[in-house]
Each structure stands twice: as structure tokens, then as C-alpha cells.
């Protein structure tokens, strides 16, 4: 089962065989029992017959499947979601259009366009003649993540797509394996542990020294790069017990001279090699999603993640070796609940070093990329809204004018939490996510279905949901849904509406697979924002210092929604990022930390 599930070449060949052998049997039977004997003597005739059998079989198979689904939906009092109507067979043109928009457009823009064109909130893309659904219906998301959780798994196809990067880590496993991973990881996000801010304090001081150095010389800095280093170094010590990463001690990108990396800017050295591989692998995963079930054909001869994995493995090797050495030194003893770190406990629970490596990489993604994304877009919003910056700084200085904040300090900063929540609403770190159905089910319909539910087929049918789109819907958030307004998280009446309909705000997912590091991320982001605003009074965007190609295309100007006003280029590769970084200049208020 492992071989079939995770060897994508094997899975693809088996699927191909299931499409090719029935027509072969049909053509043989027709040739032997129906057509004259001299027909078999011509290879060309037999080939034409086989091709015709394939086309006939596939047509009947597709039409029968659609008829079956329509009949089952009607029997259950439901309707089928609208199906995307492309110009080419199998909606191949929709695949190509998606790829074009991904390269030149706004994050998740292609899905938004498809839904708008079809006037619905849930749509069957029908790619490669197969069912593949997308939804921006938050009630459907509630069913997927909570009320019908057991029927919506990650699914073999989605796991196969990401397995080359995430392996058998927490993001690459389904229930019940995922429950085991969460049980191992949960103790390290316990309240007592995430209230210990000493690690945040150490690395935030390093980060602020870089910010001060650039501010004093009137130079800009890529804040996305700084936050990625800060969150990685902090995670390395907090979760893996190593303070040897020290990415904040390495040279920074130079304004106006840096090159474009896979996501942000290109970084030199061993750390730069890891970042390039880590981010490139995530982009491969997103491209695979665009190709849907045909991505294995594109990578049949060469797995595009393999080279990146080798680079990541070399970078992570010292952390793994240190954990192995500690385990040998402990002998038969295991770490207690309050001893060691995450990697030590993983080593105690398994002898499978590959599994430990996979978990390490999974947690690094969660700890580095998601919180770095939140911090990056928060600063970007403060650049665009100096009034918010001033109000936020007033709250911070009133509570903690200098020095590191405590957990209680952060808990009482209501406006700080409002700013972070509003950033998470407009720029969720995971703007797109996927599930797949085990068995056929019904999900809530929308205005286009006249109250009838929607029928979704079973059998590993993919369903993508769009937090970024849901959290900007005007019918859910008001006419100002596209605007940055932290006050919506302060006004009691507006907060009551959010609490009453919680699945319209899902930056940390929801249900049994809600993000374990949610509070860790809030604390880390809050701590860093307090320290920055104690020192700096204002922020100015300087995207002219970003690498060539980082600024939004001229075609974005005047577009609807945030696309028409954005000064940076939000894109998605597992997590949301700004293409080419976010370059800012900071105004110094206080030079001491």
C-alpha cells in the first residue's frame, strides 16, 4: 500500500493502465468475433480500431459517471455544482490559463475569476475529465473542517503531491497517523512553554540591530528576509534545541543589488542554499496542484523535488546528528515531559531517522514561513496606514515603553491583536488549502442552488478551499471587506458577528486539525511588533530597491479589489509571500533597546 500511495510513477502507470486495458480488450474482441479475419492482418487498421475504442470507452465512462452523479444527487435532494466549461477537451485550456494567472496575477486570483464567471461559490473545474472542486463557501468549509471532518481527509492524491517535500511529517499524513503526530508535537506548544519569551528576546535584539543599522544609514531593508531569519532561528532553539543556526548573523541582501529568489530575494551561502531549495520545493508543489492529476506525467523521468531535498538534507544534517548523539548519551533513558526539545522526544519515540527528518522539515515550515508571513504583511500594512502605526505605537509605549514585554503585557494589548487579526484576514499565511472526500456527501449550497445542498462525489475527489477569498467577501465582512481596518476587531457589534460565524475567519484552519502553533505564532508576532515599535516610529515602503520584477505589473493598476491598490506582489507557494521581498525604510524614535 505504501508503494502504491507514495510512488507517484507507480500510481500514474496503474491509473493509465485502467484507462487503456478495457479499450484493448474491446478492440481484440471486436477484431476476433465481429470483423473479418483479414482485418487482423493490417496493423494500421488494428491501431485505428484501438484508438477508436479508447475514445469510445472514455466518452462512455465520462458520461456515465456524470449521469450517475446527477442521479445520486437528485435521489438525495441535491444538485451538482456548476462545471467549468473550457474551450478544449478536458478543460486543458483552463489548466494553461491557471498557470498564466499564477505567474502574472494575484494569489488565488484564477480561482476567484472562475467562481465569478460561473456565478457560484462552489465550482467543479473538470480538469482532465475529472471532478475537482473549489469553494469559497464558508459553510462548506465548516463541513470540511469540523461537522463532516471524518469524510474530508487530505487524501492519497494530495499526500502524493506533497510527499516528495513533506514526507511522513505532520503535513504529509492523514488521520489516524496525523493524530499521532499531533500528540507528539502538542506538548511543545503548551501554555507554559510558549509564555517563555527569552528566546524571542534574544533573536529580536539581533533583528533590531540590523534594522537600526540600515535606518541610521537611510538604507532600506527587506523585512521579509529579516522575519524569515528571526522565526527560523527562534524555532531552531525553541523546538530543536540548537542555537547554531544564527541566520541573523549572516550577510543581508543589499538594496538595489539583490537578485530574485524563488519567493523573496536570493541569499548567499549555505543558509541561502537551504532557503532556495526550501522555497523552490514549495513552488513545485503549487505547480503540481495546477496540473492536477497529470503532474506525474510531467515529472515521470525526474522528480523536481529531489535535488532540493538533497540540499535541505545537508543543511539539516547537523541538527539530526546532534539529536542522535544526545540519544546515545542518554542510553535507555527517555526525556521527561519537561526535558529536552521536540527533536529529542521524536528520537525517543522512533528509530526511523527519515521520519524525524520529515517532522523537522514540516515544523520548520510552520514555524518559519507562516509567522514570517504574518509579520511581513503586518509591517506592509503599517507602511500603507501611518494612522494605524501611530495608534498601535501609542498602545505599546503606554504598556511597555522599553524592554521585552511579558505574556500579560501582550494579553492586554487589544489593538495589537486587532492589527494582527486584520492582517491575517486580508493576508492569511495559507491562502489555499485542500481536502479530499472519502465517500459521497452533501455540502451546503449557495444562492445559485435555491437552497438545495450540493452533491460531492467520493473516492479521493479533491476539494480546495480559499481562506484568502472567503476572508475578503463583502457579503461576510461588509462593503469595506477589501480595506485594512483593525477597528472591526474592536467594535463590539462587529466582533459579535465574527464570533457568531467563526468559519469566515480561518487563518489557522479549524476543527480537529486546527494549527497547534496558533498561540505560539500570536505570541511571537506580538513580541516582535512590540520590540520594533518601541524603537521605530514610522515605516516607508521602498519597493524600488527590490529585485527587478518584484513590483506588481502595470496591468494591475485599476483592477478590482486589493489587486488594483497593492504595492507589493502577493503570491502563494504553500504559504503567502511577497515576490522579491518587502523593502522598507524605518524612522528611528529610540536608539536604545
Image (cartoon, rainbow, N blue to C red):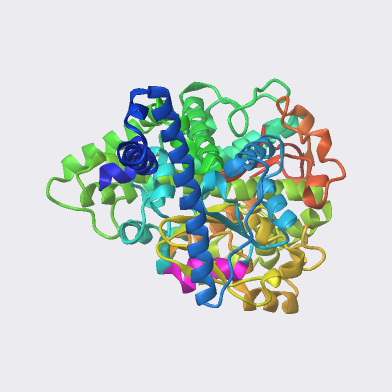
Nearest the eye: 110 or 164: 110
| Dominant SS type (magenta) | helix
On screen, residue 339 above or below 324: below
Query: Seen in the image, is 408 located left or right of residue 546?
Result: left
Residue lying farthest right?
Answer: 558
- Does residue 135 show up magenta in the picture? no
Nearest the eye: 450 or 427: 450
**At x 52% / y 71%, what residue is drawn?**
73
On screen, residue 88 above or below 134: above
Residue 274 position in % (x across, y down): 46, 29
**At x 67% / y 61%, what residue is drawn?**
471
Residue 272 position in % (x across, y down): 51, 26
- Tally of marks: 0
Residue lying farthest left?
Answer: 332
- Does residue 146 show up magenta in the picture? yes
- Magenta span of residues: 138-149
The quarter of the picture where the C terminus appears is top right
**At x 82% / y 65%, what residue is drawn?**
479
Nearest the eye: 388 or 469: 469
User: Residue 387 occupies which quadrant of the picture?
Assistant: bottom right
Residue 101 position in % (x across, y down): 69, 39
Residue 139 position in % (x across, y down): 59, 71
The answer to whether one can see residue 275 in this image is yes
The answer to whether one can see residue 572 in this image is no
Nearest the eye: 255 or 164: 164
User: Residue 212 occupies which quadrant of the picture?
Assistant: top right
Amino acid at each position: 500500500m505504501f508503494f502504491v500511495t507514495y510512488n507517484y510513477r507507480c500510481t500514474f502507470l496503474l491509473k493509465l493502465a485502467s484507462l487503456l486495458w478495457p479499450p484493448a480488450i474491446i478492440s481484440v474482441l471486436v477484431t476476433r468475433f465481429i470483423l473479418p479475419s483479414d482485418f487482423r492482418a493490417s496493423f494500421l487498421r488494428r491501431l485505428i480500431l484501438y484508438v477508436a475504442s479508447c475514445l469510445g470507452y472514455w466518452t462512455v465512462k465520462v458520461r456515465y459517471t456524470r449521469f450517475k452523479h446527477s442521479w445520486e444527487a437528485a435521489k438525495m435532494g441535491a444538485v451538482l455544482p456548476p462545471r467549468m466549461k473550457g474551450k478544449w477537451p478536458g478543460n486543458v485550456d483552463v489548466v494553461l490559463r491557471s498557470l498564466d494567472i499564477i505567474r502574472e496575477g494575484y494569489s488565488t486570483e484564477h480561482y476567484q475569476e472562475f467562481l465569478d464567471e460561473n456565478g457560484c461559490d462552489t465550482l467543479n473545474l473538470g480538469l482532465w475529465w475529472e471532478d475537482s472542486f473549489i469553494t469559497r463557501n464558508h459553510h462548506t468549509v465548516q463541513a470540511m473542517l469540523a461537522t463532516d471532518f471524518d469524510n474530508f481527509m487530505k487524501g492519497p492524491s494530495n499526500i502524493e503531491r506533497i510527499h516528495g517535500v513533506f514526507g511522513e511529517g505532520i503535513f504529509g499524513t492523514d488521520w489516524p497517523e496525523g493524530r499521532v503526530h499531533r500528540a507528539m508535537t502538542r506538548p511543545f506548544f503548551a501554555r507554559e512553554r510558549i509564555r517563555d519569551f527569552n528566546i524571542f528576546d534574544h533573536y529580536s535584539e539581533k533583528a533590531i540591530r540590523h534594522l537600526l543599522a540600515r535606518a541610521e544609514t537611510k538604507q532600506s531593508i527587506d523585512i521579509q528576509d529579516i522575519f524569515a531569519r528571526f522565526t527560523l532561528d527562534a524555532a531552531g532553539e525553541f523546538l530543536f534545541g540548537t542555537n547554531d543556526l544564527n541566520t541573523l548573523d549572516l550577510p543581508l541582501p543589499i538594496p538595489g543589488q539583490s537578485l530574485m529568489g524563488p519567493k523573496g530575494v536570493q541569499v548567499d551561502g549555505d543558509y541561502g542554499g537551504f532557503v532556495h531549495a526550501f522555497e523552490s520545493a514549495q513552488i513545485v508543489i503549487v505547480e503540481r496542484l495546477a496540473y492536477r492529476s497529470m503532474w506525474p506525467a510531467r515529472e515521470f523521468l525526474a522528480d523536481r523535488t529531489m535535488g532540493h531535498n538533497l540540499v535541505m538534507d545537508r543543511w539539516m544534517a547537523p541538527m539530526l546528528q546532534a539529536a542522535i548523539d544526545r540519544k546515545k548519551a542518554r542510553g535507555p533513558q527517555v526525556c521527561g515531559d519537561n526535558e529536552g526539545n521536540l527533536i529529542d522526544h521524536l528520537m525517543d519515540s522512533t528509530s526511523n531517522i527519515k521520519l524525524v527528518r520529515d517532522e523537522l522539515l514540516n515544523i520548520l515550515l510552520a514555524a518559519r514561513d507562516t509567522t514570517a508571513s504574518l509579520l511581513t504583511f503586518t509591517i506592509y500594512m503599517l507602511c500603507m496606514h501611518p494612522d494605524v502605526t501611530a495608534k498601535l505605537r501609542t498602545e505599546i509605549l503606554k504598556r511597555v515603553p522599553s524592554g521585552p514585554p511579558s505574556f500579560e503585557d501582550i494579553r492586554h494589548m487589544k489593538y495589537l491583536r486587532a492589527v494582527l487579526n486584520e492582517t491575517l484576514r486580508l493576508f492569511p499565511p495559507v491562502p489555499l488549502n485542500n481536502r479530499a472526500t472519502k465517500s459521497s456527501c452533501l455540502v451546503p449550497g449557495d444562492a445559485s442552488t435555491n437552497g438545495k445542498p450540493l452533491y460531492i462525489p467520493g473516492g479521493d475527489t479533491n476539494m480546495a478551499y480559499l481562506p484568502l477569498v472567503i476572508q475578503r467577501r463583502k457579503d461576510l465582512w461588509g462593503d469595506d471587506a477589501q480595506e485594512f481596518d483593525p477597528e472591526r476587531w474592536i467594535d463590539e457589534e462587529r466582533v459579535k458577528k465574527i464570533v457568531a460565524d467563526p468559519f469566515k475567519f480561518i487563518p489557522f484552519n479549524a476543527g480537529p486539525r486546527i494549527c497547534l502553533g496558533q498561540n505560539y505564532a500570536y505570541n511571537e508576532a506580538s513580541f516582535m511588533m512590540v520590540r520594533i515599535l518601541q524603537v521605530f516610529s514610522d515605516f516607508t515602503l521602498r519597493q524600488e530597491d527590490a529585485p527587478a520584477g518584484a513590483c506588481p505589473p502595470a496591468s494591475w493598476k485599476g483592477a478590482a479589489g486589493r489587486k488594483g491598490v497593492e504595492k507589493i506582489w502577493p503570491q502563494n507557494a504553500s504559504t503567502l509571500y511577497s515576490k522579491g521581498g518587502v523593502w522598507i525604510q524605518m524612522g528611528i524614535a529610540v536608539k536604545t533597546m
